[in-house]
């Protein structure tokens, strides 16, 4: 669910190339999504009526041991979103 959410949001909210990477560690799995948008995910009140979302980022943060957002180097634009999941 976390990988699907991160990649779906990257595709939904950006234009350009998005990538998804899964890395297995001895006690965890790292999900990494990269996209060209500088806008970082944020917590917001879920929209129960209008259908505009707001459920995904809180879900990712509840399921993951840790989440981290890194801006691309200056001039490169974009960001990397990582979620570390228990194995």
Image: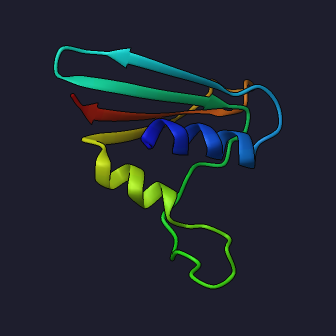
- Relative height, residue 29 to residue 82 (above, below): above
Instruction: Decide which of 61, 37 is in the foreground and name it.
Output: 61
Q: Residue 28 in the image: x percent, y percent?
A: 23, 25
Q: Residue 18 in the image: x percent, y percent?
A: 70, 28
Q: Residue 36 in the image: x percent, y percent?
A: 73, 32
Q: Residue furthest left?
A: 27
- Relative height, residue 66 to residue 28 (above, below): below
- Relative height, residue 11 to residue 18 (above, below): below
Residue found 43% across the figure and 28% down from its top: 31
* The C terminus - image quarter: top left
In this picture, residue 55 sits left or right of residue 68: right
Question: Where, by quadrant of the figure, is residue 23 drawn?
Answer: top left
Residue found 47% across the figure and 55% down from its top: 57
* The N terminus - image quarter: top left
Q: Residue furthest bottom?
A: 49
In this picture, residue 11 sits left or right of residue 62: right
């Amino acid at each position: 669910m976390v990988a699907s959410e991160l990649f779906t949001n990257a595709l939904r909210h950006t234009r350009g190339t998005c990538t998804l990477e899964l890395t297995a560690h001895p006690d965890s799995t790292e999900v990494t999504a990269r996209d060209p948008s500088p806008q970082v995910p944020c917590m917001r009140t879920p929209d129960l009526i209008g259908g505009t979302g707001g459920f995904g980022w809180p879900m990712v943060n509840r399921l993951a041991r840790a989440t981290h957002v890194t801006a691309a180097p200056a001039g490169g634009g974009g960001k990397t979103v990582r979620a570390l999941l228990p194995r």
